[in-house]
Amino acid sequence: MAGGGPSLMDSLFQRSLDDLIKGLRLSSPDNKLNFISKSLDEIRREIKSTDPQTKSTALQKLTYLHSLHAVDMSFAAFHSVELSSSAIHSHKRVAFLSAALSFNPSTTDFILLLTHQLRKDLSSPNHHDVSLALSTISSICNPDLARDLTPELFTLLSSSKMFVRKKAIAAVLRVFEQYPDAVRVCFKRVVENLEGADMGVLSAVVGLFCELTVNEPRSYLPLAPEFYKILVDCRNNWVLIKVLKIFAKLAPLEPRLGKRVVEPICEHMGRTGAKSLAFECVRTIVTSLSEHESALKLAVEKMREFLLDDDPNLKYLGLQALAIVSEKHMWAVLENKELVVKALSDVDVNIKLEALRLVMSMVSEDNVMEICRILMSHALKSDPEFCNEILEFILLTCSRNVYEVIIDFDWYVSFLGEMARIPHCQKGREIEAQLVDIGMRVKDARLELVHVARDLVIDPALLGNLYIHGVLAAAAWVSGEYVELSRNPFELMEALLQPRTSLLPPSVRAVYIQSAFKVLTFCIYSYLGLNGDVASEPVSDTELDNDNVVITHKQTPSTSSSKHNLTQESIMSLLNLIETNLGPLAGSDEVEVQERASNVLGLIKLMKPRIIGGLNQSEEDKIKEELKASETIKLIYDAFSEELAPVSLNSQERVPIPDGLVLKENLNELEAICGDFKLPLSTSFSLVKTRMLEKDATSISECQSKEESEPSNESTSLLSEHRKRHGLYYLPSESKESVSNDYPPAHDPKDKAIDEAEDLVKLTEQSLVFKKKSNPLKPRPVVLRLDDGEKSNFVSKKLEVKEDLISGAVQEVLLGTEASTSSSISKLSKKSSKGVPELKDNTGNNDLSEVSLAGSGRKKHNKERKHKSSGKEKEEHNNKDKQKSDRRHSKHKSRQRADSALAAQSQVIPDFLL
Amino acid sequence: MGIRFVLMVNKQGQTRLAQYYEYLNIEERRTLEGEIVRKCLARNEQQCSFVEHRNYKVVYRRYASLFFLVGVDNEENELAILEFIHLLVETMDRHFGNVCELDIMFHLEKAHFMLEEMVMNGCIVETSKANILSPIQLMDKAA
């Protein structure tokens, strides 16, 4: 078949849909794609056939392949359009079904070609054709189609065939969304259907309002009487559920409405045997009527029934409803506490999660310890996934608002340590961040923190667990940073240098070595301070006076009679230990490890002769040497004892920027590099590097020069250059000697940009106070904008505008706020003679007295709507005197004013849009 | 918009019917179906019938070898959707006589028409089995 015109053969021997399906079933999985592409070739040929039967079958097959085997069928769009005009209903069905399943309302151009056929079908005497067209519209409607077909839909809204009418109502929702002006035309008829007796129609129209009220409920308040009637009279659960949903939206807007509906809702709840309706009643009460105490009590009782039920579905929903109540009425949760806790060990992870959420919502200062204990025991026996969920919730809740609920930090810190030891724990990062964060924020917790850190660092078993390497890094950092609080620095040193540290990733290992460096400095400092006369800081004394020191280590000489067990020998063995362990690392491939190891070894080289030296030297030399050593070590020690603290986001701004410093550029780059890292990473550079390695290995070197604020002993040329340029980040006091210091890195700029300018102390004093204020200060503009955008829960902004248009138009129709006919409407009315008279009826059919009635909350009166229509005559006045009416509006209640403002706004937009 | 999609999937995770009430392109559909099927089919009888996925809530129910999965938005009543699924199955049962996977495979169009009668634009418009089936029976007669 060269050239591919469809031949007679194709038509005669065309495979039917059944053949295709059978073929698909017979073909092996490997062969399937092949089979599909072969069939597709056939279809491409057949679909061009002039015989409608052949075409229809081809389209049928294609639709099947598209729907279930993800075959692209956009090429056949025109054929669908073509076939839709067939006189044979079954062909038409195939065509419209294929269109409904495959057309993209926003990009398929062929939809416009359907307009004429759809219009024809909508006015067809065959109601199956009409219904088909309506279904199609509801799935492929775009603004053009909606505009062009509004008049036909309008007619169908009061069709005598309920079968058609209900579909027209369902379709009109889509039309409203696409073309808000249609509201002006059709809304009144839609409202009329609220009083219909036909269940299908009622179900459709209530469903329509349920969707509409989600977005802008206020506009539909005037219809409350109609909804109320349905609520009281209707016995169809589907409809009742929808009506309840509508009231859930309306009741919060009008307290009197709530009072009115709460009774029938409770009645339904008590009466009905249908769980779906009962649950909807519960949900309505807890979301919107929770201030009605007796109703709430009933609802909570019902929830308890659900929670006690064996049906997992009811349990799940009960928990969800409880979660809604918990926001305002914690007592309801507390009352069912034991059920919630029981649900934590349910077989269903979804139920467990809901229960977990609820449990966490109960957390307060008083019960945080108890709850955490319970959760911990659950975590231990749960599967890894849920265990980590629990841990995440605990970590999140406890750290909320800078550890708001935690009073006993000693407990919390040891709890964090416990968490890290849970075998499944994968929350190492968060624990790591919190350990360091607490270390910096909470001075009183440091002693316990050091103990916890010691236990973590010293346990060789933990080193093998990949997930807690971060925690170990934090523990190592804590051990080094607050070494003066440690009971036994020697033991710590051993732990930091234990052979299994080779299992650590280089970044964590670097922290270990750096901590060892700090511990070493501290030990020598103490030693010299005790043996010489440099002792100036009492800190070391108090800690080392501790009699509980465990003397089990080989480097602690047995001869030592000193209660501080700091003898020359012990120091020497300490130095030897370090040399033995770090010696090999000086040749490590990892620059961080290598460099830090060299630092430590360098210090030892410097110190060793001076400590040892005394043996062979004269007394004078010895003292001199020791003095030198003391001086050096004191400088290093001082550098280390510089306090770290959390710094407010804004503190950086308060530092004057020196000339020639291109601050902005650098920070921007930094942002790009570590923008994703949310954790308040405060330990050291190497931790940052861990992240770097994962996220952006190439940028490490770049980061090092920019971000690293932890210069090493030998200042390289690069570093000194950096120091020159960014002197701000360096403590000026250190410049005289190349000593190592442990600045807090300028890591994670988002969280805590710690700057080490000379006014650090001043800043840290303020920082804690400023923290709360300054945190929201910076992101505030963003938040505000988000608030606006999220107000009505929209998926896209475009849709939001449209919804506003809908509710604006609805308000016009219902309240008659403004009666300006937009240009598009007049266009429309010219097009269809049918639309014109109704249009006049609908736009601005209220006089002002009616408006004020509606505005003052008398919407429960059923008569209101009839009143409304009586005001039609005055409509023209309104029309003419827009401004006047506006002014008069403003005299009404503020709510009314807001409404008219909304309406006014919405009138401007359609002209832009259409 | 209430119901966002209706899926029928067999035990092996193959889609047997897919009806979306909002436009998704083929790729999006495929990934969504894959994700949901993976999530739901792994669950057992003792677990609840609701799964949250992305911004959908998926309500599902298993009938023999076939899973019926309905994606709804968060506003929808989950239990009502379960009843809807049951209604759908009962309707199909009435038409096909103890409906099975093959019935839906070979009569996909009809299944779509039934759905079309029941749901329009994501809203449930018809809940009477007789009303749902009458146009289809008429079509059968005509054919």
Image: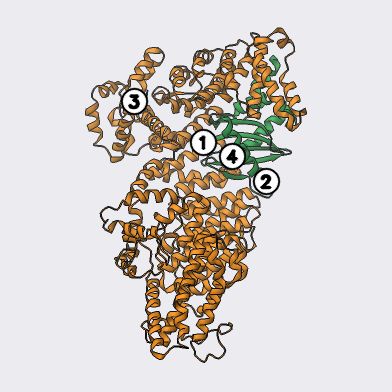
Label 3: which residue?
A912
Picture colour for chain A: orange
Chain for mark 1?
A
The alpha-carbon separation of the residues under discs 2 and 1 comes to 43 Å
Q: Is residue A58 above or below residue A322?
A: above
Is tag 1's residue or tag 3's residue first in the polypeptide sequence?
1
**Which numbered circle lies on residue B42?**
2
Callout 2 and callout 4 share a chain = yes
Residue A543 visible in image: no
Q: Is residue A62 above or below residue A597?
A: above
**Which numbered circle lies on residue B80?**
4
Chain for mark 3?
A
- What element does badge 4 sit on? helix
The single residue placed furthest to the right in the displayed view is: A26
Residue A167 visible in image: yes
Callout 2 and callout 3 share a chain = no
The residue lying toward the viewer, choosing from A320 and A449, is: A449
- Name the amino acid type tagged 3: Phe
Compared across the picture, whether A651 is left or right of B65 comes to left
